[in-house]
Amino acid sequence: MTKHHRGLFSILKNKNAVLMIAAATLIFCGIIFLWFASFKLPDISTFEQRKVIQSTKIYDRTGKVLLYDVFEDVKNATIPLDKISFYLRNATVAIEDSNFYQHHGIRPTSILRSMLANLTTGSFGQGGSTITQQVVKNTILTKDKTISRKLKEWFLAVKLEQVLSKEQILEIYLNENPYGGTIYGVQEASQTYFNKNASDLTLAESAYIASLPQAPTYYSPYGNNRDKLEARKNLVLDRMVENKFITQDEANKAKKEKVEFKAQEKTGIKAPHFVEYIKQYLEDKYGQTMMQENGLKVITTLDYDLQQKAEEILKKYALENKVKFNAENAALVAIDPKTGQILAMVGSRDYFDKEIDGNFNVTIAHRQPGSTFKPFVYATAFNKGYTPDTVVFDLPTEFQSTCDPEGKPKDESTKPEDCYMPENYDGKYAGPVALRDALAQSLNIPAIKTLYLAGIKDSIQTARNLGIRSLSTADTYGLTLVLGGGEVSLLDMTGAYGVFANNGVKNITNPIIKIENSNGDVIESFTQNSDEVLSKQTALQITNILADNKARTPLYGPNSTLYFPGRDVAVKTGTTNDYKDTWIIGYTPSIVVGTWAGNNNNSPMEKKVSGQIVAPMWNAVMKEILKTLPDEKFEQPNPIDPSLKPILRGFWKGDQTYVVDKISGKLATNLTPEEDRLEKPITNVHSILYWVDKNNPTGPAPTDPTQDAQFASWEYGVQKWLETHPQASTTIPTDFDNIHTEANRPKISFMTPQVTSIYSTDSVISPKVFISATYPIKKVEYYLDGVYAYESTLPPYSAPIKLGDRENKASQSAELKAVAYDMVGNKGEILINFKIQ
């Protein structure tokens, strides 16, 4: 074949391929066209009334108490477009579909963008829907996110625009859209939120209503996200300016307008704050449509009996606190630490009380926690090797390194107000104080020093590990973090304390036991989600301190509202420095209860500590709870490791120690009984930074402690304190314990039995011993085959020993040991074997 022929063949071949592709494309398009042409557009009259097919029902943990039927009382009133505020029509178009009046049902560029965004998922989860598409979606099609459904939506949107005018489509949209809870359509929204007709809405009111459809529960003016609603309202106004619907001056005026929302109506709802929390959970996870049309049965974790008692108690005490302390509101969360399940949630003293914005759920709001944050800092310190016995000095201390130890700037680059020398709440200082007492009594200066030793960054990480999600970076807070400088939610704090209650194991906070659809299919069920986020020893140490009534007595007294005689309850209170928030979180092994008191508007209360304001309320709830719980005891932490360096074990007078015999006062020997050994420090008083490198606390002492930025200030306070609190100098004995010696051990021998004695297996023998001793004999203990059997305190120290009590009754021999103790702790022993028939 010639070159010319080959070229011609190639051209013909390529032309045939092109023709084949073109033919295939035409056939495919024809099939798609026929498929589209086969779609039936429902009668337009079907748009006139929206039907909620199957409502979502929310129950308590028993599945018997109906808390709320989400769409039981759906409200919808259809009105013509000319009865809807022109502002609202334009606001809706501006925020939902700015090209509504230009497109023909779909926006190809938005479709392409959403297709590209979903290319890897095979679904159409991305947005880009026009108002026309949303009308089709809400009234004709199912809400599943499949390719075929989306294709139908696009085609039907185009077809709908050929049948209805833009005004008719917008009218349907505004009459059918959800605007929160059971509210459908702008007329019901206008009546519900502003007590006026949709035709009478102002520009600002219209912008608020247009803000809602994207996430009605989240943006609800009755919920916790009023700031987010405000931001979205302003966005709507900005979009209206961009679309030349209003001027910039009109937008600015509307942004400043103070709009009053109508008080929320009471409905047949139980545990309303919790129900709204559940609705938000469902909307976030499954979407509004699934809540409307899938007949969901939601079994929550709520203990409704506890919820009722908590609501009653909080309202009673909040009204009393309003009079006594100017603290008109209160909130509570109860969680099972063993599962993470939310048992009670009271977001205010009364959900429907407009005077206090009662529908605002304080339990999920971010507020400063005061001293209830301190356990996370102490836990971080314990993780690093510090112990509850470790001592820091509670003294006036300057913590700003650019200021001198007396709180004055070192140079002109530092302003006097930059110096930081905080005070304890009562203006008193305890001097050397163990971390146990510092935490139990909520002393501020030791807490700040503990934060410095533990590290701000690591303390924040500990809090995050335990479930505090709202904290920022270490640079945001500084040393004020330990005093509650970060903002947190009561729900997160209560869940985090559950880690202490559960010995270091965190269970993710959860409000759901089971969710079923209308067919009975389980679409979600509770699964334990546990993770050890804190060492067990540290968790037990924190609990041991917070349950130590003796340690907190100097602050609260021996019989305070934190104390439940005979029951193990750990508890921590907190009050912010500005007296805007008071907290108390307490727990047993089976429940954690966090309570808050204050004012929603952040106005300060009377200057009282939380023990007077919020603790009585918490105590009343705990008393009711403890009636229903078994008497569980906290597990005790392990003893402090004796191998730790002395300063970490509480020897604040010096890090070098020696051990003496308590009785003789001389140096102990290996014969000195443990109970008579006393460890003493060699007097050499310094701040803990003299002995500890905070970056390696269990390691060697720093070679040059002055390199630590805080050392000079801490040491200055200690040395100044020593001037008025001199410590006796140490004189180390040179002689050794001469009471507990080999010579002074009691000499003991058996009178009976003898090695030649033979007894039957069920005999009762009466051994007798003869003892020669330097000091009077205190007692004689007998052990049969290594097991304690009896003790005697009188000569001849006889004892009834039953041979039938032996564990190995088949053995033909027995071992009997006698141990004699004298009055100073010396002991001697004798052992004998005899035969058994």
Image: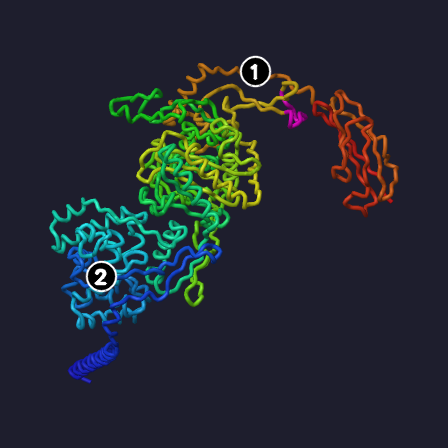
Marks 1 and 2, how far apart at CA: 91 Å
Quadrant (top left, top right, bottom left, bottom right) of the N terminus? bottom left
Q: Which residue is drawn at 25% across and 60% down?
A: 185
Q: Which residue is drawn at 21% across and 44% down?
A: 258
Disc 2 crowd, CA 10 A, few/some/many (<14, 14-19, 20+): many
Residue 183: give x, y in percent of width and height.
29, 58
Residue type indicated by callout 2: Leu
Q: How is the image coloured?
A: rainbow
User: Does the rendering let one see residue 411?
Assistant: yes
- Asked where in the image residue 585 lies, by quadrant, the reply is top left
Secondary structure type for disc 2: helix
Secondary structure type for disc 1: loop
Would you say the magenta stretch is mainly helix, strand or loop?
A: loop
Q: Taking 564 as reference, is 268 left or right?
A: left
Residue 809: give x, y in percent of width and height.
80, 46
Disc 1 crowd, CA 10 A, few/some/many (<14, 14-19, 20+): few
Residue 528: give x, y in percent of width and height.
48, 53
Quadrant (top left, top right, bottom left, bottom right) of the C terminus? top right
Q: Residue 174 carries which label?
A: 2
- Asked where in the image residue 431 lies, by quadrant, the reply is top left
User: Does the rendering let one see residue 24?
Assistant: no
Q: Is 510 colored magenta in this rendering?
A: no
Q: Taking 211 as reference, is 273 left or right?
A: right
Residue type indicated by callout 1: Thr
Q: Which mark is residue 731?
A: 1
**Which comes sooner in the sequence, label 1 or label 2?**
2
- Asked where in the image residue 463 lies, by quadrant, the reply is top left
Residue 765: give x, y in percent of width and height.
84, 37
Report the magenta residues as a range.
667-676
Please, is residue 152 above or below residue 820 in the view?
below
Residue sitting nearer the eye, 566 or 538: 566
Mark 1, mark 2: which one is toward the viewer?
2
